[in-house]
Amino acid sequence: MSLKDRLTRLTGEAPKPSPIDPRQDRIAELRRKLDRAMKPREHNASAGIPASRGSVTPLEHVVAGEETRTSHGAFFLSRAAMKADDVHGHVRICDAARAGVEAAANLTGTRMERNVSIEGGLFLDTETTGLMGGTGTFPFLIGLGWFEAGSFVTCQLFARDFSEEGAMLEYLSELASDRQFLVTFNGRAYDLNLLAARFILNRCRDSLSAMPHIDLLHPSRRILAHRLENARLSTIETHVLGVERDGDVPGFEIPGRYFDWLRHRDGRAVQDVFTHNRLDVVSLASLLKYLADLVEDGEMVHSHHGDLLKVAGVVLERGDWNKARSMLEALTLSPHPDVAASAREALSLVYKKARQWAKAAAIWQELVASNPHDFFAVVELAKFYEHHAREHGKALQLVTRLLDGATGLSCDERASAEHRLRRLLQKASLE
């Protein structure tokens, strides 16, 4: 079934008569089979959607907003604001308004102009008719947010039908042109690509594509996935940001809610979608604050030590050796044994890279003393004795003990250790 046919059926418009085709009966039968296959899905998608009982509730009665016009036409605009003392999860809005933009940008490798403040950012999240991609995906609700005088403003653009997309996108482009950078969650792979295509289709100016872009999905995966089931924004909200949503609409229901709105024009169908989208936008600001604080403060008293360890790794990859070294040195004192051990390993490699051999060797010796079968520590210390201290006997002793007593070595680790042992035996025989 074509997209046009599906939209016609969903919106309830009368189909146009078509010429008789000898294959028409066969096509009709196929459509009936498709309808039977889709019926369970439609039932699930409609779960929780308020049923129309002869009357509908106007959208503006359940969502604060009004019709707004541009040169492309009209659309529905809803605007709200959270005050400085309002709380979203663990974070007060006034605190989120002090998030370090440069620190967050460093986590994503985004180049920012100097002296860019958090108030120059535009937070963006879309709700669409599905994830099929291409021109068949329609962004019917665009959630935006920004900091203004310590408060956080949310602005939601809603296309009441497909004809209002151009007006909505024109308004978005004009609003974005006054902002300095963009913040999304998976916007790099989804939202921005989708909107870029919609701008082209509607012949609207695209102010988003050229903006510096901080996408929080990938740093969230790198830093938080070690302690979460997944890196979805909803999971991060619950386990990291302290946000609890009461009666939130599931994401898989949202396309069905919009199609229900198109059929019945009952505002209750999309009321919860507006709430869901607005909370997503506010959570972007809260998440930006959390990640930036890990980089800027590295405060071990209040931060999750595992998160700090992951941040140190990202900072190291970005080339800030001094910052990474400082973070790792602090984490070697962590009361969590796994974190402290991993921090010592990473710190030893930082010292090694800086050719601070005495400091690096001291860590390896400490790790070997604690566990003579620590593959990483044994190999690094053996390398040090072989290539720098020129004490082949000590290196040989370390590797021999590792192979004799270790039972948890992988095949690759054992092969590597045996190769090193043969080389050391050869060098020892020549001394």
Image (cartoon, rainbow, N blue to C red):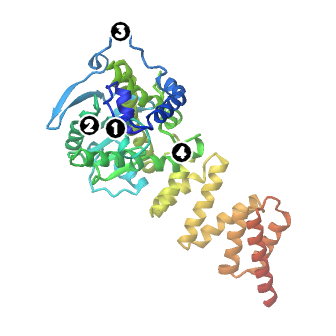
Q: Position of residue 184 (x, y in %)?
A: 38, 44
Sequence-wise, the earlier of marks 1 and 2 is 1
Specify whether 88 is left or right of 313. Answer: left
For the C terminus, the quadrant is: bottom right
Which of the 4 quarters of the picture holds residue 19? Answer: top left
The answer to whether 227 is drawn above or below residue 366 in the figure is above
Task: Name the residue: 46% across, 28% down.
Answer: 253
Residue 54's disc is 3
Q: In the image shown, does 169 or 316 lie closer to the viewer?
A: 169
Element carrying mark 2: helix
Specify whether 198 is left or right of 92. Answer: left
- The amino acid pointed to by label 4 is Leu
Residue at the spot of label 1: 139
- The amino acid pointed to by label 1 is Pro
Sequence-wise, the earlier of marks 3 and 1 is 3
Instruction: Find the distance from the CA under tag 4 to the CA under tag 2.
Output: 36 Å
Sequence-wise, the earlier of marks 3 and 4 is 3
Instruction: Find the distance from the CA under tag 1 to the CA under tag 2.
Output: 8 Å
- The amino acid pointed to by label 3 is Gly
Q: Position of residue 362 (x, y in %)?
A: 65, 66
Q: In the image shown, does 141 or 138 lie closer to the viewer?
A: 138
Residue 224's disc is 4
